[in-house]
């Protein structure tokens, strides 16, 4: 791998304009082809998991699948009594205007609230659930037209499609704001690192170009792995972080070798050295992130597949940019720097270790065992809250109250609690026995205090598929809703339908989806975790020829991920940080967050580990004893790891400012994980552990000392 990176980097450095032009063409082609083939969005069928998914498949085969419903609510202005005539006129206008839309399947009769202070009109759409948010703008325009025509009442529209659309818009605005925050901070950080605007711009521009190329490629790949709508978010989240980090690793090494050579090496020779050392670490680290992220495909879930695809693509593209356009750019900038140095006659100084790094190395050198123990105890204390983690899916009621659609939803459910959730019993079978069993089931279910009216039955055109809809006047996140689902599945349905021969049945609905999705992930977790640990072990062992280092990598990644998730639970499952981070606690963690974080953190943790161990191994191969090599590696890599960590933390922490709670949770966890990994795990735990193990850390490989991994300084121009 080192020879490959050196060969590619050498060609790029010797033919800089070809490499730069080739990269720009590559980015343009990726984006152009992506736009040409279009993005293949996931459809409703791609989201089916568990018993709920099985029930929905049966219903879809019979043509009685669930259709999205939008609710138009008509109320009085202020606290006045609702004028019945005005309300009826507005409801009739809603029905007239909505019926004219081709996406509308039916408009229900006006439903008066019990206190007669509100009227609800249900609009059923003849589109897939996942398509509803794309067509809901037309409905909202008609609702606004009704409001304009009837100013004496308040006419609002809400529903899952409206909420999804509002969330998508909010996410887009938040991401735009995140970019405005992260780009200047990243640029300022890099300016402080390099004291050069041109060098500071290189990582940012390369990261942005990698993101653009990855977006284009993701559109192409979406025709194999459908896009669940999260791919773009992941590409932006991960792309800026790894893109800047990989470029930073490479740049810092080139600058270090330039200072060490004192002007005796050409720009091409310096690129060769950077490619043979940091370039190799970047390639290995990028491959580690990509391969470890690929285990998310084992979840067999369209959302995790989209996350994996976005992460893998942007990481591999970032690695490719570090192997091609970056060496070419460095060669051109290096030539300019050489000419300036000749004119100014300035000696180049070799960077020295900072005071903090020197203090840490002395502490670890004197008491490595105590340092290791205290640092591990700190990480375990941070990880402890993970034991009480509660994982749930996020219902529409958990979205930010700042969104108008969410406000209208809470107003609607306050007046009509029966629209909060629904159970759907899907039965495939025909005959009088099935009809009687469904009638008996409806009667039994309605005796449950949590299940209420309306209860309706839909039957397919061929009479073979039936759907019993049961209203649940509780949000899916309220414990009463899952409890009623359990009784329905384990008691009511078996007691009535199991006795009928030749039928197939399953239960779906809002509550079933809420319960089955996290359960599906928990069932897949052992496979994902086992594959992740194995992949981490193999990649590290193969990269450094050491099983011991592979085991260390697994254990430290586990520790880092556990501590980050522990902090996540401590912050978001309680209420103490609500005002600080601007969220409303659901008392749980989003079902997709922990598993995604666990996998991504394993991959990102390898960045600093590979970079630090590469420097240590390099020193050992150059004849330095392992103990001293650890301190040399810390001294040489401290500034770049710190700089890279600051950039990554900035990118991830900016997502905490987003309105959507799952994005907040993801951003905070990633930021905390990088901080802990860079300043505790790789700065204290790993060096102390390596010192205690000594040469045993390289087992079973016996490193041959005295064979330099880098070119001698005499290999000049």
Image (cartoon, helix red, strand yellow):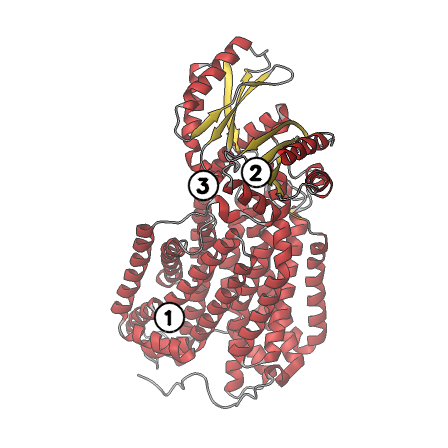
- Vertical position of residue 651 compared to residue 429: above or below: below
Q: Nearer the viewer, residue 63 or 637?
A: 63
Quarter of the figure with residue 11: bottom left
Element at badge 2?
A: loop
Mark 3 or 1, nearer chain start: 3
Q: Dot 3 surroundings within 10 Å: few (below 14), some, or many (20 or more)? A: few
In the displayed structure, 333 sits above or below 570; it is: below
Query: Who is closer to the viewer here, 388 or 126?
Result: 126
Q: Which residue is mark 2?
A: 399
Judge from the rendering whether residue 54 lies leftward or rightward of residue 137; answer left or right.
right
Q: Is residue 185 visible?
A: no
Please tell me which residue lies in front, 71 or 373: 71
- Residue position marked by numbered label 1 in the rendering: 323
Q: Residue at x 64, y 38 (%)?
A: 476
Sequence order check, earlier mark of 2 and 3:
3
710 relative to 493, above or below: below
């Amino acid at each position: 791998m080192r020879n490959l990176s050196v060969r590619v980097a050498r060609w790029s450095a010797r033919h800089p304009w070809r490499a730069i032009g080739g990269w720009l063409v590559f980015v343009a082609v990726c984006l152009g082809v992506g736009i040409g083939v279009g993005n293949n969005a996931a459809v409703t069928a791609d989201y089916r998991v568990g018993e709920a998914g099985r029930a929905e498949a049966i219903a879809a085969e019979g043509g009685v699948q669930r259709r999205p419903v939008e609710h138009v609510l008509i109320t009085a202005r202020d606290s006045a009594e609702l004028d019945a005539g005005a309300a009826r006129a507005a409801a009739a206008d809603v029905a007239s205007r909505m019926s004219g839309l081709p996406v509308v399947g039916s408009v229900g009769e006006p439903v008066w609230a019990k206190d007669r202070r509100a009227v609800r009109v249900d609009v059923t759409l003849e589109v897939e659930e996942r398509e509803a948010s794309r067509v809901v703008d037309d409905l909202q325009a008609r609702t606004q037209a009704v409001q304009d025509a009837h100013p004496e009442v308040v006419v609002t529209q809400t529903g899952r499609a409206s909420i999804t659309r509002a969330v998508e818009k909010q996410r887009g605005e938040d991401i735009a704001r995140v970019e405005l925050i992260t780009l200047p901070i990243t640029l300022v950080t890099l300016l402080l690192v390099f004291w050069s605007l041109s060098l500071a711009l290189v990582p940012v521009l390369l990261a942005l170009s990698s993101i653009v190329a990855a977006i284009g490629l993701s559109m192409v790949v979406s025709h194999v792995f459908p896009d669940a709508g999260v791919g773009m978010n992941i590409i932006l989240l991960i792309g800026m972080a790894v893109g800047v980090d990989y470029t930073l690793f490479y740049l810092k090494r080139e600058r270090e070798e330039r200072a060490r050579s004192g002007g005796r090496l050409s720009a091409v020779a310096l690129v060769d050295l950077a490619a043979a050392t940091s370039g190799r670490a970047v390639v290995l680290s990028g491959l580690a992130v990509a391969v470890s992220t690929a285990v998310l495909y084992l979840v067999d879930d369209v959302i995790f597949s989209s996350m994996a695809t976005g992460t893998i693509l942007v990481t591999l593209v970032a690695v490719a940019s570090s192997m091609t356009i970056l060496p070419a750019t460095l060669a051109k900038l290096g030539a300019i720097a050489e000419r300036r140095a000749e004119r100014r006659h300035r000696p180049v100084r070799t960077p020295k270790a900072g005071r903090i790094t020197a203090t840490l190395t002395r502490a670890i050198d004197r008491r490595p065992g105590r340092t290791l123990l205290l640092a591990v105890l700190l990480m375990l204390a941070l990880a402890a809250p993970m034991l009480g983690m509660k994982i749930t899916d996020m219902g529409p009621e958990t979205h930010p109250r700042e969104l108008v659609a969410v406000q209208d939803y809470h107003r609607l459910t306050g007046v009509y609690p029966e629209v909060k959730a629904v159970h759907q019993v899907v039965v495939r079978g025909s005959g009088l026995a099935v009809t009687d069993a469904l009638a008996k089931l409806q009667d039994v279910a309605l005796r449950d205090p949590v299940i209420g009216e309306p209860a309706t039955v839909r039957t397919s055109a061929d009479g073979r598929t039936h759907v019993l809809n049961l209203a649940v006047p509780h949000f899916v996140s309220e414990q009463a809703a899952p409890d009623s689902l359990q009784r329905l599945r384990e008691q009511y349905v078996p007691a009535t339908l199991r006795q009928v021969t030749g039928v197939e049945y399953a239960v779906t609905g809002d509550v079933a989806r809420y319960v089955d999705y996290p359960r599906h992930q928990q069932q897949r977790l052992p496979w994902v975790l086992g594959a992740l640990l194995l992949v981490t072990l193999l990649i590290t062992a193969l990269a450094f020829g050491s099983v011991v280092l592979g085991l260390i990598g697994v254990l430290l990644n586990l520790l880092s991920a556990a501590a980050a998730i522990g902090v996540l639970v401590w912050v978001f499952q309680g209420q103490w940080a609500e005002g600080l981070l601007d969220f409303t606690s659901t008392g749980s963690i989003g079902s997709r967050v922990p598993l995604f974080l666990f996998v991504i953190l394993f991959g990102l943790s390898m960045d600093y580990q590979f970079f630090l161990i590469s420097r240590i191994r390099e020193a050992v191969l150059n004849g330095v004893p392992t103990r001293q090599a650890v301190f040399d590696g810390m001294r040489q890599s401290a500034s770049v790891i710190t700089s890279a960590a600051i950039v990554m933390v900035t990118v991830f922490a900016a997502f905490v400012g987003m309105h959507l709670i799952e994005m907040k949770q993801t951003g905070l966890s990633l930021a905390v994980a990088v901080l802990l990994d860079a300043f505790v795990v790789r700065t204290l735990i790993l060096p102390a552990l390596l010192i205690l193990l000594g040469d045993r850390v390289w087992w079973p490989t016996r490193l041959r000392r005295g064979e330099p991994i880098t070119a001698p300084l005499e290999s000049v121009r």
